[in-house]
Amino acid sequence: MNLFLLFCFSLFVILFARFGESWAKWLEKTKKSKNLQEDEGNSNFLSLYKDQENVKVVNLVRTFQRVDEFFIRSFLDSAEIPNYLEFSHVSRLFPGVKISGYTDSVISVFEDDVPEARQIVLDYVSGSTKSTSSESSSRPFGRAPPELLL
């Protein structure tokens, strides 16, 4: 057993010495590209917010799953409604578990865009709950649907 552990440790040291630097560069490059992709929508929203005066930001919808975040933001983006996602990292911890303030993400929009954005979210929520209502009877726990905050 000790000989096996010594062999594994030696192999790890040799591989790390050989590939450690290139692996660290690859890992750093991957982290940078992920951060750019995730923050792209929020940075657009923040740049618009800085350019406008006396604009109010309103929390539109609370989601408990990443899938809902992606779909709602995609629909808002296709309607050219700027949106901002808060707490997206938290919904990764316990996806689908509904604990307000702990496992939710909030999508916000400008006050001027609320009527159109609200209709988009209502259409999405009504469509997503219809498709899961037949499935929820066979499962003991259904997924937590998004909650409209307005």
Image (cartoon, rainbow, N blue to C red):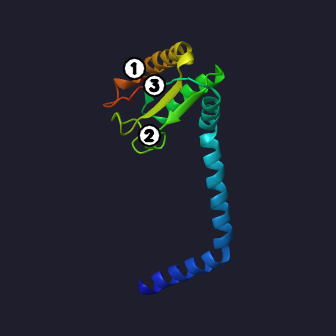
The residue singled out by tag 2 in the image is 91
Which amino acid type corresponds to the residue marked 3 in the rendered image? Val
Marked residue nearer the N-terminal end (3 or 2): 3
Disc 2 marks a residue whose amino acid type is Ser
The residue at 46%/15% (across/down) is 126
Q: Residue at the front extreme?
A: 53
Q: Nearer the viewer, residue 141 or 73?
A: 73
2 or 1: tag closer to the N-terminus? 2
Residue that numbered label 3 is attached to: 61
Q: Residues within 10 Å of mark 2 (few under 14, many from 20)?
A: many
- Element at label 3: strand
Cα distance in 3D space between marks 3 and 2: 14 Å
Q: Residue furthest bottom?
A: 3
Residue at the extreme left? 140
Disc 1 from disc 3: Cα separation: 21 Å
Q: Which residue is mark 1?
A: 133
- Position of 11 relative to 127 (above/below): below
Amino acid type, mark 1: Ser
Q: Residues within 10 Å of mark 1 (few under 14, many from 20)?
A: few
The residue shown at (62%, 32%) is 50
Cβ atoms under marks 1 and 3 closer than 8 Å: no
Is 6 situated above or below 106?
A: below
Residue at horizontal 60%, vertical 34%? 46
In percent of width and height, residue 4 lies at 47, 82
Q: Nearer the viewer, mark 1 or mark 3?
A: 3
